[in-house]
Image (cartoon, grey):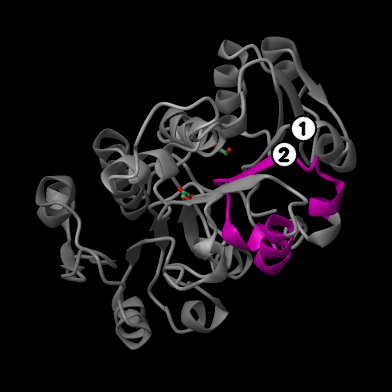
Amino acid sequence: MGRPYVFITRKLPDDIVAPLYDKYDVNMWPHEHLAVPRDVLFKEANQAEALITMLSDRIDEELLKQSVKLRVIANVAVGYDNIDVETATKRGIIVCNTPDVLTETTADLTFALLLTTARRLIEAAEFIKEGKWKSWSPLLLAGTDVHHKTIGIVGMGKIGQAVAQRAKGFHMRVLYYNRSRNIEAERALDATYCSFDELLEQADFVVCLAPLTNETYQLFNSRAFMKMKSSAIFINVGRGAVVDEEALYEALIHERIAGAGLDVFAQEPIRSDHPLLQLPNVVALPHIGSATKETRYAMMQLCCRNVIAVLEGRKPYTAIQSQ
Ligand code: GLV
Ligand code: GLV
């Protein structure tokens, strides 16, 4: 019997994948910054017992149906909306994600994006580089305060709770909305559970960390932006499709909200000529929530450990429970 075949959809560092090469026949898509084409992915998935996938790979029913040897998919992300988990589970394929290892790192980025948007840091940095700084003046690049304001967190999972913890350090009032109440988080973080509408009406910073599901698809639509304060800033580090981007654009140009900080987009990569990116009060980042060397290494390592566990017939560390 040959060794199990493992396909990795992106070039990962050699030291990370070495344990896999020791045990299995491994093939890796050779590009670090280019996604694997769909026809290649289909061919490889048809042969593989294990796949390590990126959030940019669409693992749908059509692909799963022809992946006849597949036993495990390890997604290098905490989110897994790119994978049809229900179909995978039905076919006996285990799907794993990377929770916990990225929680604090993603919370850091979320808070950094909030501060950057509120204090107009990108505009300010560009202003000085463009030689526009002529004198100190009272309202030059004046932003809005973060401390002592109200933050409304939509999606109070582990990352949401880590953001709330940071907000406490800034003396913020913490509201949250989540599919289910989290009494423990309320006690530990002095966070107040409220309805989606109450959160929108009261928060100075509306922070979206919700996963993309049928229920959250375009949750932030024109109605939601209409409910927000005109001084409010919207931050999204969840998934782009949780937002109706056209409605967000309309809300920004008609000054129904004050600004937005976005790490995720409905279409990734977003085109640089996208209307949202032309607005001075939009801070846009290329989906870097968990992007520190330490955390990305930990995520990749966890994927390898999950693959080895399943192929050796052991319980994976972080399998997704199908709903
Ligand atoms: C990133 O968006 C992730 O889900 O890990
Ligand atoms: C989601 O917020 C998680 O970290 O699991």
Q: Is residue 153 visible?
A: yes
- Report the side of 70 relative to 298 (left or right): right
| 20 over 201 or under it: above or below | below
Which residue is at the front of the view, 318 or 214? 214
Q: Residue at x 58, y 68 (%)?
A: 84
Q: Marks 1 and 2: in contact by CB < 8 Å?
A: yes
Badge 2 density bin: few <14, some 14–19, many ≥20, Cα 10 Å: many
Quadrant of the rendered image holding ligand 2: top right
Q: Mark 1 or mark 2, which is nearer the start of the sequence?
A: 1
Q: Quadrant of the N terminus?
A: bottom left
**Does the magenta portion include 9?**
no
Of residues 252 and 239, which is closer to you in this image?
A: 252
The answer to which image quadrant residue 43 occupies is: bottom left
Residue 225: which disc? none
Image coordinates of residue 135 in percent, x first then y, are 37, 30
Ligand 2 under 8 Å from disc 1 Cβ: no
Whether 127 is drawn above or below 95: the answer is above
In this rendering, position of residue 185 left or right of residue 133: right
Q: Which residue is mark 2?
A: 232
Give the left or right position of residue 192, taking residue 169 as reference.
Answer: right
Residue under the image location 49 percent in, 33 percent down: 140
Image position of 317 with respect to 172: above or below: below
List x then y, in percent, for residue 257: 73, 47
What residue is pinned by disc 1?
203
User: Element under label 2?
Assistant: loop
- Tell me which amino acid carries mark 2: Ala
Which amino acid lies under the numbered mark 1 shown in the image of this protein? Answer: Ala
Q: Which residues are magenta?
A: 224-253
Task: Look at the image and tell me whether residue 302 can be seen.
Answer: no
